[in-house]
Amino acid sequence: MEGHWSLGSIVESEVVMIYGVFFANPFFNSPTSLIIFAIIAFLLFGSRLPSVMRSLGRSVVEFKKGVAGIEDDIDEAVRSADKEVKAKKEESDV
């Protein structure tokens, strides 16, 4: 549908924007800088890094589920409003 937007498309565009800002940064333009970033992350989080990343992944999944639930609620509200409008229009046509 052209011109159709949804909450998911807004969230996806925000993620793309954040991704672009992160990787368009001059600091992160080479493999060496990414290795330095990984070393710093390892020093900060140490042995907790795998559990931190796992928790981050779970958080992202839960966020996506929440967004999908909100989208479903909005779509259902729009569908029910459309049904009501059609029903009123049919009543007025009769």
Image (cartoon, grey):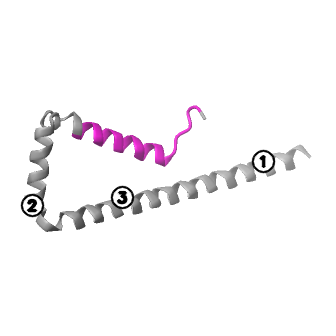
What residue lies at 32% left-to-right and 39% top-to-bottom? 17
Vertical position of residue 19 compared to residue 77: above or below: above
Q: Picture quarter containing residue 89?
A: top right
Secondary structure that dominates the magenta span:
helix
In primary-sequence order, the first of circles 2 and 3 is 2
Q: Picture quarter containing residue 77?
A: bottom right
Q: Which residue is mark 3?
A: 60
Residue 85 location (% of width, % of height) = 74, 48
Instruction: Out of 33 and 84, give the one closest to the viewer.
Output: 33
Instruction: Out of 66 and 31, give the one closest to the viewer.
Output: 31
Numbered label attached to residue 86: 1
Numbered label attached to residue 53: none
Indicate the secondary structure of the residue bearing disc 1: helix
Question: Of tags 2 and 1, which is closer to the observer?
Answer: 2
Marks 2 and 3 close (CB-CB < 8 Å)? no
Q: Which residue is mark 2?
A: 44
**Circle 2 residues within 10 Å: few <14, some 14–19, many ≥20:** few
Instruction: Out of 13 and 27, give the one closest to the viewer.
Output: 27
Q: Is residue 79 left or right of residue 72?
A: right
CA–CA distance in space, label 1 to label 3: 39 Å
Amino acid at dot 3:
Val
CA–CA distance in space, label 2 to label 1: 59 Å
Amino acid at dot 2:
Leu
Amino acid at dot 1:
Lys
Q: Is residue 44 magenta?
A: no
What residue lies at 57% left-to-right and 56% top-to-bottom? 72
Region rendered in magenta: 2-22
Q: Picture quarter containing residue 42?
A: bottom left
Instruction: Out of 70 and 27, give the one closest to the viewer.
Output: 27
Classify the position of the N terminus by image quarter. Answer: top right
